[in-house]
Amino acid sequence: MSKELMDALDLLEREKNISRDSLFDAIENSLLTACKNNFGKADNIKVEVDREKCEFKCYATKTVVELEDDVMDPAIEISLDEARKIKKKVEIDDEIDVPVNSKEFGRIATQNAKNVILQKIREEERGAVYNEYFSKEHDIVTGVVQRYIGKNISINLGKADAILNENEQVKTERYKPTDRIKVYILEVKNGSKGPRILVSRTHPDLVKRLFEQEVAEIQDGTVEIRSIAREAGSRTKIAVYSNNPNVDAVGACVGVNGSRVNLIVDELRGEKIDVINWDDNPGNLIQNALSPAKIVAVFADPDEKSAKVVVPDYQLSLAIGKEGQNARLAARLTGYKIDIKSETQAKDAPGFRMEDYMDESYDEDYEGEFEESEEVQEDEE
């Protein structure tokens, strides 16, 4: 029996990630429950479990009385003659541990003990799954699409199912059962029926984590992702910085012939990705962020978090982008409100002076964190 029990505990610990100590506690509690159901009480019951040999013994502590007729409650009292069969040197009013034969328990008591063990196993299994996925919160995992639940999607992550809500789905993506996709874990909640896991395909950090997985220089800290702005399913801009002057941050992220960035684009099902160099100088950063448009001049005001940008006339639509997307993402990426004008518009503006826009690289010593902003000011032609 002890060998079978040991094998069963090893299997549960290995497959369900349940600790042996928790299982032993469950066995002890189940025996106490069985004793209570069999004898009506368990206050005087002791359970001893040898956790190395997987052997257990159950004792009832009873008070010794003189005669069999003096025994008022067999659950807590024993006659002197019966007590001396267990321990020779015992006297009246002594307490003695009497072995309990658990094999003689009735069917109901045995079933209740079994239920206690099964309940403990279920609780520990749910706890282990919760802890595993809670440690992966704000990270990405690979899941398999199972089915649609209304407009939401059930994703199997292996040991648990996750929910991809409608507002966390990319509108241009279509999923079929058995599709393998990477998702970003937004939140893990512990519920009575197990962990409730919410995932996303639209979160900007999904792209960030994908770059961290694919780019070795990001993993070892040589290259940092300083900022990211995303419109899921359409375009992402990501600003990177190299801590090693001999390493090109953009080149490391793009890879040879685009090998690294193309893997991420494929995972995002064709979403365009612009990788730019981060610059502590806000003017240079804004110029990089508006890529691929060419910039004539930039004047950035760090105090107001605003910037005026002049572009060639033929580059105005490119700088603004389709439906303002390029300028909007650049504003989010840099944290600046951006006012884009063509050269003609700028020259026609009252008080315009080109030298105002060419202000010695716009505060070279400026360093600071950029807060996210979604404001973009656009002038109609």
Image: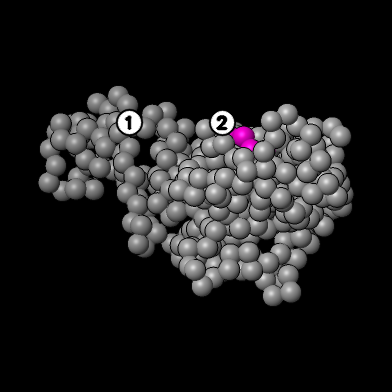
Residue positioned 58% across, 54% down in the render: 278
Residue at 84%, 32% in the rendered image:
380
SS state under label 2: loop
Q: Main secondary structure of the magenta part?
A: strand
Residue 43 has which mark?
1
Image: 229 above or below 64: below
Q: Position of residue 143 (x, y in %)?
A: 71, 54
Q: Are marks 1 and 2 in contact (CB under 8 Å)?
A: no
Q: Amino acid at mark 1?
A: Asp
Residue 335 tag number: none
- Mark 1 and mark 2: Cα distance apart in space: 73 Å
Chain part drawn in magenta = 304-308
Mark 1, secondary structure of its residue? loop
Q: In which quadrant of the rendered view does residue 214 lie?
A: bottom right
Seen from the viewer's position, the closer of residues 261 and 287 is 287
Is 355 on the left or on the right of 343, as rendered? Answer: left
Which label belongs to residue 304?
Answer: 2
Expressed as whole percent of the image width and height from the top left, the position of residue 259 reads 72, 71
